Image (spheres, rainbow, N blue to C red):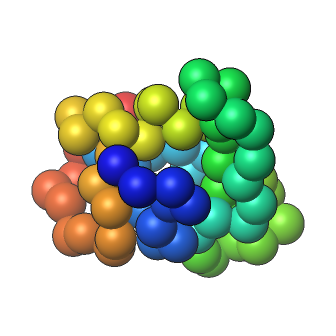
Amino acid sequence: MKWPPNQKWTSAKIKKGYRHFEIKNFGGKGDGRWVELFPILNKVVSFRVKFSELKNKKEWESGWVQLEDNKD
């Protein structure tokens, strides 16, 4: 996956009450790379994840993708 990362992401599971996110900030080098995400419906909430976590296709999809509802 390229660096810097894509701006829009969809989480397979609900995180912080949301599934669609944009990147607010990113940084680090090598294995220490991280991204700060915020939900598109609430720009006040944000959290960081390791860049390597975004590479997990079971957890994250690049872009905004419509997924089936889940009950997590």
Q: Is residue 44 left or right of residue 61?
A: right
Q: Residue furthest left?
A: 68
- Residue 34, compared with residue 20, is above or below; it is above
**Is residue 64 in sight in this rendering?**
yes
Count of labels shown?
0
Point out the residue furthest to the right here.
44
Residue shown at 59% from the left, 23% from the top: 31
For the point 41% across and 55% down, which residue is it? 2
| Residue occupying the far top of the picture | 31
In front of the other: 26 or 16? 26
Residue 22, horizontal then vertical, whole percent: 58, 69
Residue drawn at x 33%, y 61% as measured from the top left? 62
Q: Is 59 on the left-hand or right-hand side of 43?
A: left
Picture coordinates of residue 29 (x, y %)? 70, 35
Location of the C terminus by quadrant is top left
Q: Is residue 43 left or right of residue 6?
A: right
Q: Residue at x 73, y 66 (%)?
A: 24
Q: Choose between 16 and 3: the one closer to the eye.
A: 3
Q: Quadrant of residue 70?
A: top left
| Vertical placement of residue 5 versus 57, above or below | below
Residue sitting nearer the eye, 25 or 27:
27
Task: Say if 8 sits above or below 49 in the image.
Answer: below
**Position above or below: 5 against 11:** below
In depth, the one of 27 and 65 nearer the eye is 27
Q: Where residue 55 appears, x then y in whole percent?
A: 35, 38
Residue 13 visible? The answer is no
